[in-house]
Amino acid sequence: MTPTGRRWIVVGWAAFCLACSETPEGSIAALYGVGNLVAVDDLVLTLSTDKNELRALSLSSSPRVRGPHFVPAVNPLEPLSIPVLDYPNILAGDLRWEDWVLDSGERIPQGRVEGGPFVYAASHGRRDISIVGGSRAWLKEVKRFPTAAPVTAMAAYRGGDHSKLFFATYESGGGRLHLLELKDEQTVHKASPGDLSARPIEIQDASGADIFQNRVITALSVLPGGGLAIALRGAGGGAGAALYVLDDTQALQKEVPLGQAFRMLATHAAARHAEHSDGLLPAGKWLYALLDEGSCEEEPCESGIVAVDVEKGALVLDITGSPIASVGGRPISMGFAPVTFRDREAGIETETLAGMYVTGSGLIGMFDAAIPGPLQTTRTRAESAKFFSPNEAGELVEATYIAGPLLNADGTPAVHVANGASFNETVLVGARVFVPGVVLETSALRTTATDVRLEPVANPSRIQPGDMLEVWRGEERCEEVEIAWVDEENRALVLAATPTCTGELHFKLRAGLSDPYVVVGTRTGYMGRVGPNQMFSYVGKNFSSALGPGKPLLSIEFGSASSLEVPFNARWELVLTSGYSGPSRDIQSISRCSTRIAAGVWIDSVRKKAYISFSSSNALVEIGIEAWVEAGLGEAEVVCYR
C-alpha cells in the first residue's frame, strides 16, 4: 500500500469517528416524500413515500451520537430503511392510554398516550397493508396483509396483550369497516397467510339502515377504552357527512350529523386544567377533527379544527352558538399532549392540553385544546392602570387615586380574565359618566295624565332609576332631573320632575349612585355597569371557551368605597394584554430547511418537543414548545432532521 493510500485510510477513519462522536444539528436520512408521524417508545417513525420505506428518528442518545438522530443501519453511515408497500401515504400506530406519574408522585389516570408495538402503512388505491414491528428489537415489516379493496383510513388500539387494527376500504356501494386483531411481533411474523383474517364490522342506525351505504369512510380514531370514532361523507362528496362513535364492543353509541365532513380525527390523554371539574380534563373527552374543505353541502366550505364532545355526541359550541374553529389557512395535521407552561414574570404555571397544527403552506400554530380556545401562555393582566380626574376647568388629567375600587392590596388592578377569553384592549371604567349608546338627541318630552316621560330612547336597559338626565340648551347645561323609573317596553324614561328649561333642548344621561361605574372596552364597546363593593363580570362576544355560557370572562372587583366616595366624572384606563400565543408562525427563516409543504405533527409531552414532517424538504423539524410560548423561537430551538 502506498503512503498516499495509508493517508486516505487514516483521514477517512478519523472523519468517521468524528461524525460518530459529535452532536449533530440534524441527522442525514435521505427522506423522500415524508408523511405523517407515529411514535413508539423513544422512536418517531415517518414515511419516506417516494422510496417505499419508513425511517425512525431516535429521541435518545446512542453510544455514537448525542441527542436525537435517525436510527442507523448495519452500516452506521447509512440510516436504517424499513421497506414497506409501494407509495405509502397512510400511517397509523397502536395507541394505548397509560397513567402518568409526575415528579411530585401525583398520578394522572390515562395521562399519557403511548405507541406500539405495531405500526401500519397503507396507500390510497392499494389493496394491502404493511404491518411493521415498531419497537427497537424489530424495526421491520413483519407481515404484508392483503385487503379486499383499496384502504381509505386506519386506526389502531393496544389493550392488554393484543392490538386491534381498524381499517376502512371502499367497495361497490360504499365504505366498509374491518377489524384485524394481532398479538406480538413474533406471532405475526411467523403466521401463515391464512392465520391472519379481518372480520367486517357492520353498523346500522336507529332505522336499521347500513350507515356505510353510499358513503366513504374518511377518517378513524380509536378512543380510550377501545372505542372508535368514524367520520363519513357522501360518496359524491356532498351530503351524508356524519360522525359515529362506537364502544369497545363496536356497538353504536352516538351519531352526529354534520354539514361538512371531517378528513382527520384525533383524541387526547387526560390533562390537568383549572377550568374543568376537579381540575382534570378526562382522557378522550374531546374529539378533534380537521374540516374537509371539499365536502360541504353549501358553499363556502369552512377550513379549520372543530371539537366534538364525545359523551354528548355533539359539536362543541362557544357562547355565540358557533362551532369552535381555530386557525387560519388549511390545517394538514394536528397533535395533542398535556404540557405545563410557565409565566416566569408572574411566577405562575398553567397546565393544559396543548394542540399543535400545521397548515399546507407550512405555518405552525398552537391552541388550548382543553377549552378549546386560544392558548394562554401568560396570565392576562392589566399592564397599566391610569386614573384620570377632572380639574377645575372640567378637563380630565392624570391623577393618583389610592383609596377606591379596582386596586388590590399591593396596588395592582383587581382584574381577572378567564382562560378562553380573547381580550387585548383598553378597558375604560368611568365613575358617574355619561352612559354610552343612549340616544336622546331626537327624543321628545311628553306629559301624560300620570307622569312626565322622555321617549323614545335607545338601549333603555342601560339606564336605571336614580340616574340623572342632564338637560342642555346648545352648549349650556340648564338643569338635571332624576330618572324615576324606566319603561323598557315602550323605550321611555319616566322623570321625577318636569324640566323647567325651554328652547331647543337636547339630553344626556349620566350614571347615578346606584351603579355609578360604567365599563366600556375600546374594541368590545359597552360592557355593563356596577356599584361599589361589587364584582363586575362580563360575558359577551370575546368568548372562545366551550365550558358553558354564563362563565365570566372579565372580572373587576369594585370595593373599598361607599357611594359618597365615588369620584364624579372620573375614569380609569386598564390596558389589558391577553397573553395568548399568536394563531400561527412561519419558521421558514430559522429552520434551515424548507417548511412550505407540511405533512404531519407529533408532540412529545415528556421532552416538551414537537416534531413536524415537511415534504417540501423531506425533513423532520424539531421545535421546543416552551420556547414557542414563552420567549419566541430562535435557531437553538428549531432543528432540522433530513
Image: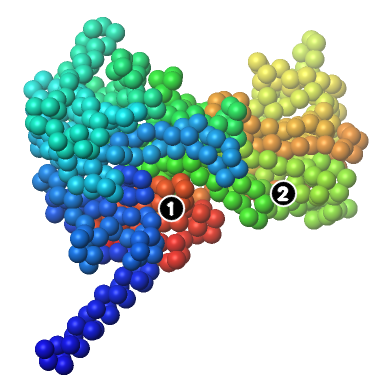
Mark nearest the camera among 1 and 2 is: 1
Residue drawn 38% across and 39% down? 114
Residue drawn 21% across and 50% down? 54
Residue 401, percent from left and from top: 85, 50
In which quarter of the view is residue 416 placed?
A: top right
Query: 518 left or right of 241?
Result: right
Query: 494 left or right of 527?
Result: right
Question: Residue 242 versus residue 487: which sits nearer the camera?
Answer: 242
Q: Residue furthest front?
A: 1
Q: Would you say residue 6 is visible in this rendering?
A: yes
Secondary structure under the numbered disc 1 in the rendered image: strand
Query: 172 left or right of 446?
Result: left
State the residue position of label 2.
573
Label 1 sits on what residue type? Lys
The numbered dot on residue 464 is none
Question: Residue 137 versus residue 309: which sits nearer the camera?
Answer: 137
Residue 519, percent from left and from top: 70, 38
**Above-or-below relation of 82 to 118:** below
Alpha-carbon neighbours of circle 2 within 10 Å: few (<14), some, or many (≥20)?
some
State the residue position of label 1.
609
- The numbered mark, 1 or 2, whose residue comes first in the sequence reads 2
